[in-house]
Amino acid sequence: MQPRTTPEVGGMGHSMKRKEDPRFIRGKGNYVDDIVLPGMLWMDIVRSPFAHAKIKSINTEKALKVPGVLAVITGETLAKYNLHWMPTLMSDTQMVLPTEKVMYQAQEVAAVIATSRYAAADGVDAVEVDYEPLPVVVDPFKALEPNAPVLRTDKKDKKDNRIFHWEAGDRAGTEKAFAEAEVTVKQDLYIPRIHVASIETCGCIADFDRVNGKLTVYMTTQAPHAIRTVFALVAGHVGLSEERIRIVSPDIGGGFGGKVPVYPGYVIAVAASVVIGKPVKWIEDRMENLQADSFARDYHITAELAAKKDGTITALRMKTLADHGYTDAAANPSKFPAGLFSICTGSYDVKKAFVEVDGVYTNKPPGGIAYRCSFRVTEAVHAIERVTDVLAQQLKMDPAELRMKNFIPKEKFPYKSALGWEYDSGDYPAALRLAMDKIGYHALRKEQAEKRARGELMGIGISSFTEILGAGPSKQFDILGIKMFDSCELRIHPTGKAIARFGTKSQGQGHETTYAQIIAEELGIPASAVQVEEGDTDTAPYGLGTYASRSTPVAGAAGALAARKIREKAKKIAAHLLEASEEDLVWETGKFSVKGAPSRSKTIQEIAFAAYTNHPPGMEAGLEAVNYYDPPNLTFPFGSYICVVDIDRGTGMVKIRRFVAVDDCGNIINPMIVDGQIHGGLTMGMAPALLEEISYDENGNIQGGSFMDYLLPTAVESPSWETYKTVTPSPHHPLGAKGVGESATVGAPPAIANAVVDALAHLGVKHVDIPITPEKVWRILKEKGVAE
Amino acid sequence: MIPASFDYHAPGTLPEALALLSKYGDDAKVLSGGQSLLPLLKLRLGQTGHLIDIGRIPGLEYIREEGDFLRIGGRTRESALESSDLVRTRYPILHDTAKVIADPLVRNMATVGGNLAHGDPGNDHPATMLALGAQVVATGPKGERVIPIEQFFLGLFRTALRPDEVLTEIQIPVPPARSGGAYLKLERKVGDYATAAAAAQVTLGSGGTVERAGLALTNVGPTPIKAADAEKFLAGKRPDAATLGEAGQRAAKAASPSADRRGSVEYKREMARVLATRALRLAVERAGGR
Ligand SMILES: Cc1cc2nc3c(=O)[nH]c(=O)nc-3n(C[C@H](O)[C@H](O)[C@H](O)COP(=O)(O)OP(=O)(O)OC[C@H]3O[C@@H](n4cnc5c(N)ncnc54)[C@H](O)[C@@H]3O)c2cc1C
């Protein structure tokens, strides 16, 4: 798309450099841990070494004797204020601090408040807790067996460990289609538990002002407004009132969904500050972050496809067990306990589909947060893209050809999927064709055949994903009842500069730049002169925050519509200034002019000045607007990724030789930022495919709870990503944009997994679960007798 | 990740450092690059009353050939080794090793002496030094003593250094003509300790047979492992594929790995074999034997 504005204005389509980067690059960002308040105290947390244990006693005597330690807070302390339990965003309950038992390793047991970070840590060491271990449930399948211990003994009527059963689609019709199918395939797959591992851990400073009764919390949160409301609801009974709660999200060093939930540490710090009357800082260390904060994925999926012999897919069925840990602390929209998993028919025109998900309690930390996956879309895409390859293998068909055959055709959009979604727009064959051209698909297949003949292992994997994001339309989407709109408040200053405030919160996505570009596009005010602010609930308009790739689709749209409201008023002012009628005015970026007399014009800057100095009689002064945008539908970005891998027959090491990513996120605001999102997303998608996994032993001990074993990829492990675009605008979004923050994380893992399986397919391998570690591959090579 | 409290000392001379070590005995630890010691303290896996930082003592950072030895100062940083032309051209095995230790940030701090003194079987230099037949100079209150590297590693995190000694120099015999070495490491990602790694140093005789072979393994046992049986087997043989393969087998037999997140016992042992064979092949190649 050719930009409509000049580079000086910097509207849509310009690769404007990020406005936030100078401060980050110079180390001038302001993160929670950079903030120091007068009289501030530190908090550190005592954590459970057991995954399930009764707490017999907590002895704080020695801890209180450690120099600098002021207080030790336990569940009993909080119980006095009825603050020892709190609701989760899914209307489940979770402990702030336990009074009876702990339910996962690293769970918060007590908190030490001290005059320094070091004293707090010494205090933690000195707290003595007497535990009595209880039977541990780690395996979600066993959790559902009739004789499994019931974990949530706090819930009076709970007789088992099932959290929810959820289903969508046509069960009977799907069964019939499978019964009548010429070919069926079935694949079990596990999408392992992983952690967002943002570079900045979680933390806060709770600052309760006893005189004014005002609570200010500086906090690493992706959704400050929702948090404020939750605090008001949870702690209303102890006197916290919403107008006297201020949540400030300063700069955030990565969120990825992990900074949506309310963690116990935040609440304890608030309680401590209220009780002590001083600011209390709590910052997790790396291991606490990795071991105790909410996890993602952990889906055990059985995926099935029914098809005709010619490859036409006729039906899809998926049955899933979701391991949520000890509480359902996901952050899905209320009506979607399994998120948007029902996007699992993917990019294909599947007539009949049925999907069911059962959520299960286990002795693990809360799981199910949306780690850069738009609510369970990663799981859905992995399942459909993997099982599509299983079908191709069964039919001895090329996986590209099978996909081409089953894509939803371009002319069928808007397309109603068998599981109930209305896909807005798409051109799937074009994206896959471009990816095939760029990577040289047919030549690679030839090379592969030659290599196989020589005993060398090389594979090519495709993933043609469809994303679903931009939650969401108020008729379906809410969190704790709050509808998932988002907002912009836009004010134009007399000299024609602007401030725009949003209900979202950037954690690295570059909102200060892209939002400014949206305003620039709509009003012709240079993006450099538009100041964007988010994250302070005292100043920003109410919004649900940034996650699930919703900022551009929802808040971005609010920005555009607020700007258009301003343009309407500007037109009236221009008519007044030009002594013309409104109908005779035409808008071209940055100014109104009189039809047929282009020299008679007023720039937006002149109009803004007039709004404060010379506004028409009868009109309110000023130039500002607010928009709360309720999206009519979700948006459906898509893409096709192709990955080429080589496998070392001695070690089982997988090396990604090339990776071509074709993305379509509709109209693009800042191409450089979009590319940055895709590069980062691809690397984050490679991580669970090859490296990352959090697992537990039979006693519920976490395996890989530090960066020693939780293998975050670096530039060294990353191939040189090759990115391309197709552009299919969203028909219902004011800017035709779709959002892109999570496409790559969602689309990359199956491309890599498919490439590895493809490299081994001639040996009879049909599937390998991620992460595909060297040893996993080596075991296959050994079993097949081809290891070096 | 907050350490318990300790006292910090920064002596300006070696005698001062030795005096402090003698004074505090078991309650003191030498601090070199800190890249192994500080993580232990921060995780409170270890605790010490006194850290004696040897970083301000002049004359402990050098790399030079002198007499029959390449001499490396005890406090020489990994990054210095990595960027040394002398090391790259004359001791490729050391260059290979320095390059795969941790990441550039750690290598800027970590020291070769610390890498040996820590006694961690996961560290990469011990195997290299075993393959090279190095020796270590320890300086204590009574002066210097030289410890052959084969006698240096006593057990997991245990070395022949006494609490009142500072490792001041590593001495590597200057290799004769037609020598070559290589270090190959399998790691899950950059900065990881080895799943397994092999160090091979080979000198070929005039007839193309192996005159001396040094072969050692990293992280497949409680100490770094010298593959003595494989070394003996190679001596006097022509280094063809079958012979190197057999040597790899024998090296793997010397390994006694334990299972962890990096792999099972079986996998690690097999990787020891694969890497030892490959390292030998590369060493022979570098020695000029094809
Ligand atoms: C993220 C990370 C990744 C790493 N990966 C690797 C890797 O892949 N391979 C690898 O080999 N290493 C790795 N290391 C370890 C690193 O190389 C260590 O720094 C090194 O092993 C120890 O050197 P140091 O100078 O830092 O020693 P220190 O940490 O200062 O000391 C280590 C121990 O040796 C003793 N000591 C040190 N110097 C002397 C001396 N001169 N005399 C007597 N005693 C002494 C100390 O008292 C202490 O007990 C890694 C470290 C980190 C933090």
Image (cartoon, coloured by chain):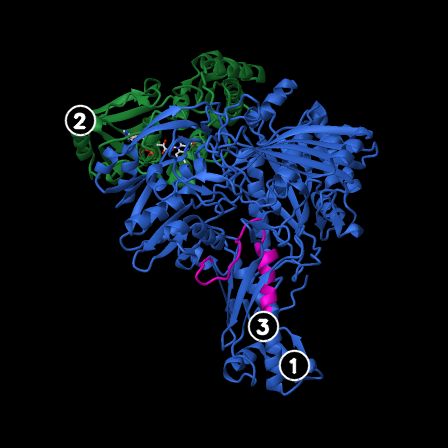
Secondary structure under badge 3?
Answer: helix
User: Mark 1 touching mark 3, by CB under 8 A?
Assistant: no
Q: Is residue A462 above or below residue A187?
A: below
Secondary structure under badge 1?
Answer: strand
Q: Is residue A414 above or below residue B12?
A: below
What amino acid type should be assigned to the residue bearing mark 3?
Ile
Q: Read off the residue under disc 1.
A: A593
User: Mark 3 touching mark 2, by CB under 8 A?
Assistant: no
| Along the line of sight, the residue nearer the viewer: B155 or A576 | A576
Task: Give the quadrant of the C terminus of chain A.
Answer: top right
- Image x and y of residue A658, in percent: 63, 40
Of the numbered discs in the image, which one, if any, rests on residue B106? none
- Asked if residue B112 shows in the view, the reply is yes
What amino acid type should be assigned to the residue bearing mark 2?
Pro
The part of the image, by quadrant, that contains residue A285 is top left
Q: Which chain is blue?
A: A
Chain letter of the residue beneath label 3 in the structure image? A
- The residue stretch that appears in magenta: A535-563
Which residue occupies 63% across, 30% down?
A: A189
Chain letter of the residue beneath label 2 in the structure image? B
Chain letter of the residue beneath label 1 in the structure image? A
| Along the line of sight, the residue nearer the viewer: A600 or A632 | A632
Marks 3/2 same chain? no
| Along the line of sight, the residue nearer the viewer: A370 or B71 | A370
- Asked if residue A602 shows in the view, the reply is no
Task: Give the quadrant of the N terminus of chain A.
Answer: bottom right
- Image x and y of residue A383, in percent: 66, 35
